[in-house]
Image (tube, coloured by chain):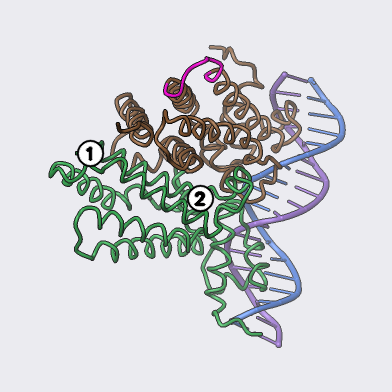
Chain colours: A brown, B green, C purple, D blue
Amino acid sequence: MEDPRSTREQILDEARALFANQGFEGTSLNDIAAAVGVKRPSLLHYFGSKDDIYRQVLSEAVLDWTERVENARRVELNGWALVDEVLRASFDFFRENPDIIRIVRREALTEHSPLGIDLGTTLRPYYNRATAFFRREMEAGRFKTQDPEHLVLTGYGALLTYFSDHVMLRGLLGTDPFAEDRLEARYDHLVTLFREMLEPTP
Amino acid sequence: MEDPRSTREQILDEARALFANQGFEGTSLNDIAAAVGVKRPSLLHYFGSKDDIYRQVLSEAVLDWTERVENARRVELNGWALVDEVLRASFDFFRENPDIIRIVRREALTEHSPLGIDLGTTLRPYYNRATAFFRREMEAGRFKTQDPEHLVLTGYGALLTYFSDHVMLRGLLGTDPFAEDRLEARYDHLVTLFREMLEPTP
DNA sequence: GTCTATACCGCGATAGAC
DNA sequence: GTCTATCGCGGTATAGAC
């Protein structure tokens, strides 16, 4: 009957789910406390404030994601294999962490995040490395020439949107977009997308 | 010195901008009133409640968008021309109404919108018509065979994301993603995307 | 480590003067 | 049509008992 997670972990877990679905302003400490099953003031024993909880959730999320991508990149692979590896790693991370995706998306929408996390600047090194990779492969003739920056942005949008907008997608498709076969079809499509954009036609 | 817009219009305009940037919960009537230059109770002379203002903004937005797409579709065109026309119409509408895009995106993220607008169900007829169109063209051999549903979703994500996430993109790119030449490059890329996915290779 | 009690503020909304 | 004044609610945060 006991939850093996510490209270602190439970708070972060429930807060993550609520922030994802209702946003920061739409989530009250009461909501989080009720989800955990404790009284509201107890939350503030573990964290200094609501902002504090949010920052913790977000930085943890960004850390998990970058770590995953770094691991995928460590493997020394040629052009196609690297694309496959990073795409697979990202896709798997997204499907395992749908809440994080929606939190990040909300951050991307807001002009001046009251919490002072500049997502664009944080992700910029990864973006630059990705575009540099595609540019290099294109110049070497292993990939067809496309605009590498827009290619990365399109991949980002095509991947992120499927997971972030799944609430709307369920209404749009009439079925659960996170069903196993649906997810596989989505992944196959993304692979096809990059193949069609990049595979040289002899 | 006089603003030609009626107070009512001004309220809707300012509310739209604020809802886009801060979300519904993140925007107070005080914020809107200050932006318009009136006192808070004056807002409620024109609208019954904050919910009322939001609903007005959103339904107006959806109406504008569907009207634009319908106009583009009215032209009787063959496969490629229709794709070009709808893509162009959507792109132009998005660039002219970046606030609406972010409001819609926020709706797509939220499980139970407190305002009872089910975006997925609303857009479903358009989605079905789009996938049916691609399927027909593919079966007729005018387009290469792809998964028509995922193709539409990818187009939706690639198009919407560039406009909805422009705050983050500015940080990511280091320049203004809405600069004229940037927008043109984005549009060209989207055309290329559909060409590469659909153009039959003889 | 978790609770009760409480302080304090900003919010949406209403009533009524002008 | 716009204002001032005010209400009541729910929010975050703090202090202190157990």
Q: Which residue is mark 1?
A: B201
Q: Is residue B149 above or below residue A14?
A: below
Do marks 1 and 2 share a chain? yes
Q: Which residue is mark 2?
A: B164
Q: Secondary structure at mark 1?
A: loop
Q: Position of residue A135 (x, y in %)?
A: 51, 35
Task: Identify the residue at image location x=39%, y=43%.
Answer: A168
* The disc label shown at residue B59, or none: none
Instruction: Between residue A150 and residue C9, name the one nearer to us.
Output: A150
Q: Are marks 1 and 2 in contact (CB under 8 Å)?
A: no
Quadrant holding the N terminus of chain B: bottom right
Of the residues shown, which amino acid type is indicated by label 2? Answer: Ser
Task: Identify the residue at image location x=49%, y=41%.
Answer: A153
Say whether residue A74 is magenta. Answer: yes
Magenta-highlighted residues: A72-80
Q: Write down the chain letter for disc 2.
A: B
